[in-house]
Amino acid sequence: NISVKNLTKVYGNTEYGVRALNNVSFEIPDKQFISVTGPSGSGKSTLLHLLGGIETPTSGTVFYGEEDIYTLDDKRLSEIRCKKIGFVFQFYNLIPELTAHENIILPLLIDKKKVDKDYLDEIVKTLGISDRLKHLPSQMSGGQQQRVAIARALINNPEVLLCDEPTGNLDTKSGTEVIELLKKAHEVFGKTVIIVTHDPKVADYTKRRIQISDGEIISDDFRH
Ligand code: ATP
Ligand code: MG
């Protein structure tokens, strides 16, 4: 599980800077499906970046299990980032010169790890991109590119998928499909999935719904 403890992020000077996140604490048990909604500028991306260890908090911290990720040395922090965390972004961030297949397995190549063919097959089948693996990103629709990005985020078999506006660049239909697939990643592969979005409709798909405003949690609902 992940624990967020008194997380504060001020960009720039502590006195006059922007307080993007103000003393936020909550628990994320394993295998939850969570949305974080809030208006533009409310601190959603900041929270996600801090959860993923890709930004440094002004104060407070994040625990993965027993490990306080902001007191770890660089080697262990990058291990946690590679093994436990997968990121999905609004603009897919695929490498244009590489095929879908090459994009998906890139994290393994960087890590000099072998491809688990069965797991790869299961991912691409679940995401419905088996017949797109030889295509370049430019030959795929936005929704297909986002599926490839989700496959890439899953390839290391992380515990958690952190998704920042994963439907922000998609039409309503492809957006809904992507959310359904993230739900599958949660249900089929047992991942904790956290979706950050300004679209309140996305929250209808998740069991737990956290709302933030001005850097603070204003509600945290759980539905069975
Ligand atoms: P959006 O829905 O527009 O993506 P958000 O909820 O993700 O917004 P954040 O990007 O977390 O909001 O930003 C929260 C606040 O912190 C905003 O006021 C923003 O201007 C500020 N901020 C974010 N990143 C930086 C930065 N690198 N330097 C300075 N200020 C920043
Ligand atoms: Mg954002």
Image (spheres, helix red, strand yellow):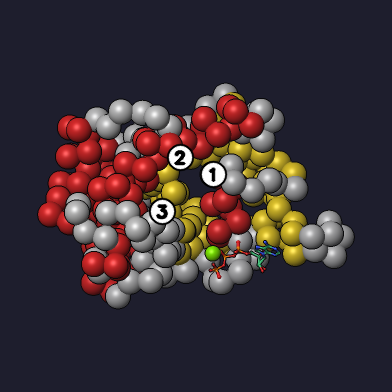
Is residue 172 something that shows in the picture?
yes
The numbered mark at residue 85 is 2
Dot 2, crowdedness within 10 Å: few (<14), some or many (≥20)?
Answer: many
Question: Which picture quadrant has residue 135?
Answer: bottom left
Residue 194 picture location, percent across and down: 43, 50
Q: Which mark is residue 142?
A: none
Query: In terms of depth relative to the viewer, which is nearer, 166 or 220?
Result: 166
Which residue occupies 36% across, 61% down?
96
Q: Which residue is mark 1?
A: 52
Q: Amino acid at mark 1?
A: Gly
Under circle 1, the secondary element is loop
- Residue situated in front as seen by the camera: 213 or 67: 67
The disc labelled 2 sits on which kind of residue? Ile
**Label pair 2/1, CB-CB below 8 angstroms:** yes
How packed mark 3 is, by other alpha carbons closer than 10 Å (few <14, some 14-19, many 20 or more), is many
Q: Amino acid at mark 3?
A: Val
User: Helix or strand or loop: what does disc 2 sit on?
Assistant: strand
Residue 111 relative to residue 104: left or right = right
